[in-house]
Amino acid sequence: MRNAIRNFQKFGFYLLPASLLVLCGALLTALLYPPSPVAEPAQPVVIMDKSYWQAHAEAMFLALLTDALRQSQEARETQARTLMYAEPLPTGEPGRPSLIRL
């Protein structure tokens, strides 16, 4: 019994750092490798119905058409603003060309 106590006193100094190292290793392993999920992932649903794809294509076409119309309208508004604030052209006498200012 005395031998066991002496051995424990001799190596007791190293037990604390060794146990902390083992504890940190176990925690790190638990954090890095979480358990796999029990439930199986759902299977993807594949829709091959013709009416679905036709409706999807029509919706995409309408979205693209609306975007193109919006961009066209914005371009026309910008052009109208530019023309609204443009300097008026000099008018000449009838039959004579107006002077061009550079």
Image: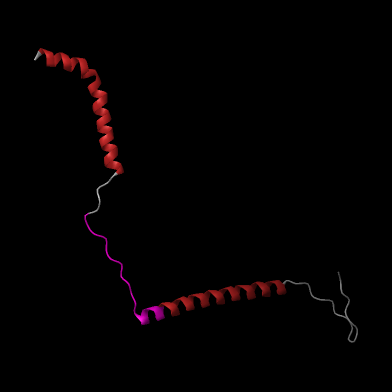
Indicate left or right for 70 with 40 as reference: right
* Residue lying at 85% horizontally and 79% vertically, measured from the top left: 91
Q: Does 2 lie within the magenta span?
A: no
Q: Quadrant of the C terminus?
A: bottom right
Q: Residue furthest left?
A: 1
Residue 42, percent across and down? 27, 64
Q: Which residues are magenta?
A: 38-55
Q: What is the quadrant of residue 90 in the picture?
A: bottom right
Residue 62, percent across and down? 48, 78
Indicate left or right for 33 with 61 as reference: left
Residue 83, percent across and down? 72, 74
Indicate left or right for 49 with 13 as reference: right
Q: Is residue 17 above or below residue 60?
A: above
Q: Is residue 68 above or below residue 13?
A: below
* Residue lying at 17% horizontally and 16% vertically, measured from the top left: 7
Q: Main secondary structure of the magenta part?
A: loop
Q: What is the quadrant of residue 98 in the picture?
A: bottom right
* Residue lying at 22% horizontally and 23% vertically, measured from the top left: 15
| Front residue (pair 51, 75) | 51
Q: Does 42 lie within the magenta span?
A: yes
Q: Residue furthest bottom?
A: 95
Q: Quadrant of the N terminus?
A: top left
Q: Is residue 90 above or below residue 39?
A: below
Colour logic: secondary structure
* Residue lying at 79% horizontally and 75% vertically, measured from the top left: 88
